[in-house]
Image: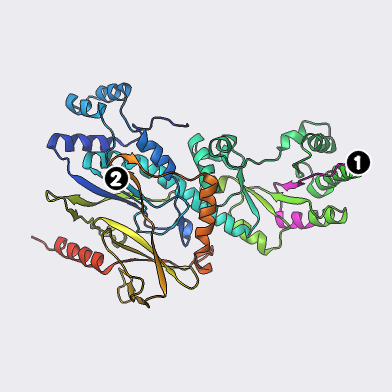
Amino acid sequence: MNRRDLTLLTDLYELTMMQGYYAQGQQEKVIFDVFFRQNPCNNGYSVCAGLEQVINYIKDLNFTYEDVDYLRGLGIFSEDFLQYLSGFHFSGDIYAIPEGTVIFPKEPILKVIAPIMEAQLVETAILNIINHQSLIATKASRVVFAANGDGIMEFGLRRAQGPDAGLYGARAAIIGGCVGTSNVLAGQLFDVPVMGTHAHSWIMSFPNEYTAFKTYAEMYPDNCTLLVDTYDTLKSGVPNAIRVFEEFRDAGKPFKKYGIRLDSGDLAYLSKEARKMLDAAGFADASICASNDLDEYLLHDLKIQGAAIDSWGVGTNLITSKDNPSFGGVYKLAAIQNEAGEFVPKIKISENTEKITNPGNKTIFRIYDKTTGKVKADLICFADEIFDTDEDMLLFDPIETWKKTKLPGGSYTMREILVPIFRNGECIYNSPSVKEIAEYCRQEKETLWDETKRLFYPHRVYVDLSPRLYEVKKALLNKMSVTE
């Protein structure tokens, strides 16, 4: 799974369209935008992830002899087109929002500028990578928010939809704010903390629960978390754990890190009772970890109920984003270069208003309140537009245009968030480590207002169009609506 050839990770129609462009001699440059229409889980924001894997895919993009032979065997591609594929390499430009950035619907999170055949080919793999990791990073961020400062461990490998989803889902979960993962391969590849305790089978394989606990404690005194719900949590599990803790304390061998894990039952009630028992025995610093089909909603409720849990292992519902299993990112044509070298804006019109695209060669500026550093809005504009933060800025909703906000000059700052990744086919961007991306993501979320981060009915961050882009879009809509 590390550094595989993903060239044929594409939909067949990308290749048949490529052959059509080739046959027609179409070589003009185009611009495609990657964007999404709605935040997953009704969240107030999303987290961008997966860019490093996109970079590796583009770098390794080439058709091997085996690839070409396979395509020849399909009987639908001409020999001259197959010859073209055998020498293929990506020669275009890519701009993207860095991983860990908070992002919002309708804005281009990745932009491809390339000859039309090249830009068409990379659509499927880019969407596959960005959609998956952005979804899991966003879900993880919600779970982390619900935990309100407690550590979240990603425990989902065995329930993920295959090895890739487990591996890159773990990567995305760390970016979203998890403190570690049970996935050892992810730990090795991405240099992130690996964590875990033991299973019920460990307890069941010994003559009794006490012996199982003592044996485990002797093997792992630096990190001893005992699973206490195999038989009876409060009558057997917790008392036996306390017995082991007492024996080690009395022997002058205190644990560096220790505690218990609950994996079933009423976690609020059991954790509070277990906390009383541990405290009464003198183990107030013992941690209580919980697992058992957790998600952000259950964590939110357990926190309200005063559950005495300070560490959470979250598996299935995080790694699969069970309640919202698709990110919904799309890849749409935005402009075609004419003979004069100018990019002519293109628009897709739909009966569904939310599916109408924003035309042209665009970039995004994030606008911050100068006093608080919080995000005011994102502004989509043409790539050559320049703004002066000393001047007043009028923002307006591109759909409900009567909704306007005036920002006085000097009261706001702006940051362009699309950055160059590839130029003329060469990568000019160095990906940070996963830990660095996770820290950047934490800082990014600090720029959001609390109302945007809440789990239920969050405040929407506005994504507006510059007046120039809005007028071009309106003109194209008016032109396309004329029936000949």
Residue at the spot x=36%, y=71% of the render?
Answer: 389
Task: Categorize mark 2 by other alpha carbons within 10 Å: few (<14), some (14-19), many (20+).
Answer: many
Q: Locate residue 316 relative to residue 428 in the image: left or right.
A: right
- Helix, strand or loop at label 1? It is loop
Q: Give the amino acid type for the residue marked by disc 1 in the picture.
A: Ala
Q: For residue 182: magenta? A: no
Report the number of discs. 2
Pointer 2 or 1: first along the chain: 2
- Decide whether residue 267 is among the magenta residues: yes
Q: Position of residue 104 (x, y in %)?
A: 41, 59
Instruction: Decide if residue 154 is in sight here.
Output: no
Label 1: few (<14), some (14–19) or many (≥20) C-alpha neighbours in 10 Å? few
- Quadrant position of the C terminus in the picture: bottom left
| CB within 8 Å, label 2 to label 1 | no
Q: Residue at x 51, y 54 (%)?
A: 440
Is 262 placed left or right of 190 in the picture?
right
Task: Using residue 399 as the reference point, say whether residue 299 is left or right of it.
Answer: right
Location of residue 221 in the rendering, given as x and y in whole percent from the top left corner: 79, 39
Residue marked by disc 1: 251
- Magenta part of the protein: which range? 251-273
Q: Position of residue 290 (x, y in %)?
A: 69, 50
Can you identify the residue that label 2 sits on?
93
Looking at the image, is mark 2 or mark 1 nearer the viewer? Answer: 2
The amino acid type found where label 2 is placed reads: Asp
Residue occupying the point 47% across, 32% down? 2
Q: Position of residue 60 (x, y in %)?
A: 36, 32
Distance of label 2 from label 1 (alpha carbons): 65 Å
- Front residue of 36/28: it is 28
Return the residue nearer the eye: 482 or 190.
Answer: 190
Instruction: Pick whichever, 180 or 355, lies toward us.
Output: 180
